[in-house]
Image (cartoon, grey):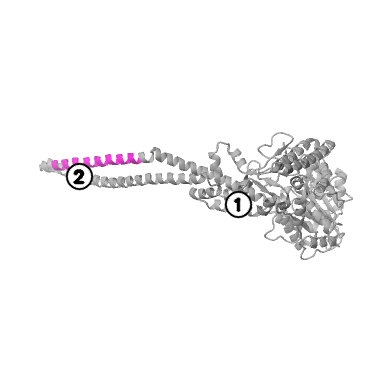
Amino acid sequence: MSTLCEVGRCSRCAMSREYRDQPVLSDPLPVGIEAAAGELRRLGVPLVAFGQTLFWDEASKAVLRRLLDEHAPEVLLFAGIHDSDYFSKLHGRGRAGEGFVRWATNDWTHRSLWAAVAETTSLFGAETPPGVAELQAAGVPLRLLAALSSDEMDDFLDSATAAYGWRGVAQLGATNQIARDVRVAEAGEALCELLEWGLRETLGLLAERGARRAAETKAEALLHRLRAAIAEMQHTTVSELYRRLIAQFYADLLGYESDRIIPTTTCEYLAFNRETCMRARFQPVQAFLCHRVGICARETYNDAVAGQGMYGLDEFGEGAVPFDLIVPGRGRGTLRVLDREVRAEFSREPLSIPTDERVCFIEDLAALVEEAVGTKAAIAGKALLGPVMFCGEAILVLHEGASAYVPRTRLWLSRLNSSCGSLRTYPILRLRQHAYDALSAAQATLRLPQHLAAAFDKPQISAAEFGRRWQSVIQEQECLLKRLAQARSVSALLAIIAEQNGGVWRDVAAELVAARELLSEAGAQIRARLGRLAEIRSAERRARRRRAEVEQRSGELRAREQEGGDPEAREALRQLLGVMSEEIRLRESRRAELRQEIADLAHSPPVQAARKRIAEIAAQAERERLALARRALLVRHMEIGDRRPTSWWFGVVDPSGAWFEEAVRRADVYLQDLSSPPDNNSVGH
């Protein structure tokens, strides 16, 4: 890695030139395993792959190891456990208590569940739940349906947004522990329950008895191995347990143990002390310690995280750098480098190390840390900086779509390099799996879960047919979501529902038509009476005006009569007023009759029954809209498993190994330059 400064070493900057001879990357970077293998051989550095859990997709990177064994067997793969992250935590509802529990996820009360270290998916499952925003985009009136439900609102929305086929182990209580510090004795039983749940759910999807028996044998072996390791390692940590088992998970898929797989952990790989501090992986730390470059590094970092829901450095306090110091038993704390102090903001008790002046050299920082907490400490980059550290002297392996931070990392690094010099890194290797396409090679009959059975229009399906059809089924469900969003009326919605579910819904649509016709007929009768009522009211107003005129004339005649006028004229007017008043009374009576007729029509049992049935049908249709939208979203999110399959699926569903071998054949590999700016289509997980 080349220097950021014009001088090799100055009094205020210690950017080492030790790595300036790092090879320049090919342009363009190669795509495909053969071309990528050639680039890997030319670069001559190992691959590093870090995952938080054994039980999900990490070991499925055995697909890459198999490809390397065929095209570049000399390349090493460090298979690491990401043990510097916090153990899964529940926030809010359900957090009370102590210990470790297996938990599902949803987009309501569990949407803030921090999932890491211990999670798995059953076959066709995904960690992503049908989101509230996704359901609303499909026109689902969630709050209205929640109000109509007999369940509490939280319970209703939890159910509506529940993910399928995912479970994680979460730590209860207020304690925040990183995986490195969690003891096997505390979490071991929950880990066994997690794997047992995933295996049980997957076994239930195998339709043939013989295949299920073979799968059960494989599942029992996996559980036995885990339980035996847990029993033996009660006094060690989850990190050590995973480190011991990860190579075996790789071997399960490869069919052999590979000496080109080297187990490690992030805390081991990023160990920071006098002996390790000058390694290229810590050069990003030096960039922030550097007096001149540090200013630029901070500014570009804050710009890169702005508006992304990530904290800028100012949020961590004066002198904060985007790295955490990790100390066994104390967890991780943000590093702050001040004029006469180095601090690590651990949650329970911050660490303060006095200094004579501001630390600008990586080796001075290492000496201070080693003297304060010993040689077992580590430094890990926050958010954007993790990939930069890993790629300082190795090639980081990521599944396609994994790590949402990478586009921001590329933005930060490209801006830093354009402003302050050159902090070069090795590339990322992206692995694009096609696990569900490859399932077509398996000899199995699958019993589909309810949402897939509806989407595929059959309860059982051969693995071969599933592999051929699953992408087209996703497209069908995407079209369904668009149509649901466009269905603004109950009639339009019922037409979609009847098309999807047929049978009784056509009868429901006919009921709606009949009820609306009845209301239309009643409405026509009411409108006719309202028309007559308006005519009578208008005539009555005219009659009242005429009577008022006559009353005024009568008053004038009365005055004249008192002065000796003719009383007969006034008597005639009095009689006329009586006739006019009777006419007005009759009209008032007729208006009252019409109002009663209108009320009788509006509240007649048939009309009330029709209105009630229409409301019931509308609510029923909206509930079915929710069911259809939820189904479509579960199918949409199933795609995650194609790109990031759970490793043990392969051996359990297809013990013959044909599924895995087809997955190897179909896998795509490409390199991604970490130091180039991201394009508009760059996305993470």
Q: CA distance from mark 1 to mark 2?
A: 78 Å
Tell me if residue 586 is in the magenta stretch: yes
Where does the magenta region start and end?
571-599
Q: Which residue is mark 1?
A: 477
Query: Left of 578 or right of it: where is 304?
Result: right
The kind of secondary structure the magenta stretch mainly shows is helix
Residue at 76% from the left image edge and 56% from the top image edge = 665
Quadrant in the rendering for residue 171: top right
Whole-percent x, y for residue 449 in the image:
65, 44
Q: Amino acid at mark 2?
A: Gln
Q: Which residue is mark 2?
A: 552
Residue farthest to the right, as pictured: 275
Quadrant in the rendering for residue 238: top right
Q: Closest to the observer: 437 or 341?
A: 437
First-in-chain label (1 vs 2): 1
**Considering the image in quadrants, where does the N terminus appear?**
bottom right
Q: Closest to the observer: 64 or 157?
A: 64
Whole-percent x, y for residue 155 in the image:
60, 38
